[in-house]
Image (cartoon, rainbow, N blue to C red):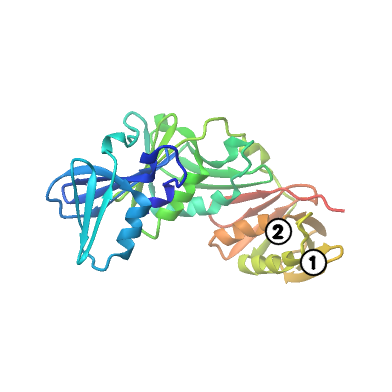
Amino acid sequence: MIQSVVSTRTTLPILSNVLLKAEEGKLWMTTTDLEVSVRCAVEANVSKAGGTTLPARRLFGIVRELPSDEIELETTEKDEASIQCGSSFFKIFGLSEDEFPPIPDFSGGNSYSVEQRVLREMLKMTAYAASTDETRYALNGVLFSFKGDKFTAVATDGRRLALVEQEVEFPPESEGEAIVPSKAINELLRTLNDAEGALKIHTTKNQIAFEFGDVLIVSKLIEGTYPNFRQVIPSQCEERVPMERETLLTAVRRVSLLASEKSNSVKLSFEKNHLKITAVTPDVGEAHETVPVKYAGKEIAVAFNPEFIMDPLRNIASDEVYLELTDELSPGVMKCEVPFLYVLMPMRVN
């Protein structure tokens, strides 16, 4: 759980190490790359409390290969660790725990409580839309907004925007916003398995922490101002089309096989009671697929990036989605029965 943030290339040797702290029936393990820190615990019979740091990947490699399930770990004052397991014995050299960067203090900041399952679903429905363009640094993460008894998660890369809201109780003085880097979001998604129970979110001006069970994930926040995302959400639409999520996903996936790498677009043509999905690539070929839909409005043909259509369809659990459209040049909006919406900019094609 903790080794994914360990850097293989670092000028600070201590960052390649895991901090081990033995105390009161638990062995706490912490890793950091100075941007994201992860700490978790395993139960242990502690005969003498203390701490050291050991090379994280090497320790993991050893433990993974050990035969028995009972491991005895002993360290000296010089941070030399002996690992005994059955007939296997290893000795590895570590560094002093004093060199390990401390985890920030979150007293005096804001705290919020969210169900683990709820946060996991919110991140799954939004994180894919965050930008990877480093010139737009403020968009390289997910915006957490706590305002008016609502917890809103938003991600955008300028061409699409994913938003999901959840009602959460917190005092009015705790209202605020934080841009959480994609690296921390990915770490959270990896660590938040199917466990149930509450999760605490702690924020300060430039740090955020997620605490659940014996796990703590701490991250620096992205500094900067997140754009006003509300203004890009269309206030009204002319047509609203209900569609089966899985049917739309598989149809777009098949047709996109013949979308060109250059234009990378598929055309959605809505006519009475059916949707025609088309990709035409000169010198390669073309693909068409017709999907039955409940539609009685005007004929609309709009082109979208197929990956941008498929991303939300892969990550929401609803069986039915709604696509709201106005014309071929206006943004499309995808919604489902949960408080989720996805704004998608159309592509201009000849």
Query: Percent position (x, y) of residue 217?
Result: 38, 44
Q: Residue at x 60, y 64 (%)?
A: 320
Q: Secondary structure at mark 2?
A: helix
The one nearer the camera, 235 or 186, is 186
Q: As shown in the figure, which amino acid type bears the numbered disc 1? A: Lys
Instruction: Using a 10 Å C-alpha cutoff, classify the residue at mark 1 as few (fewer than 14 neighbours), some (14 to 19) or many (20 or more).
Output: few
Foreground pick, 254 / 281: 281
Quarter of the image containing the N terminus?
bottom left
The numbered dot on residue 306 is 2
Q: Is residue 160 left or right of residue 180?
A: right
Of circles 1 and 2, which is in front?
2
Q: Percent from the top left, x then y, of residue 249?
A: 65, 65
Tell me the residue at 66%/37% (across/down): 231
Q: Position of residue 7 (x, y in %)?
A: 44, 45
If you read the primary sequence from the N terminus, does the residue marked by circle 1 or circle 2 appear first?
A: 1
Alpha-carbon distance for marks 1 and 2?
23 Å
**Residue name at image x 49 percent, y 51 percent:** 122
Tag 1 near tag 2, CB within 8 Å: no
Q: Count how many numbered circles sit on residues in the image.
A: 2
According to the picture, the residue beneath numbered tag 1 turns out to be: 272
Asked if residue 272 can be seen in this view, the reply is: yes
Note whether 314 is above or below 166 in the view shown. Answer: below
Left or right of residue 271: residue 244? left
Name the outermost residue toward the left. Answer: 47
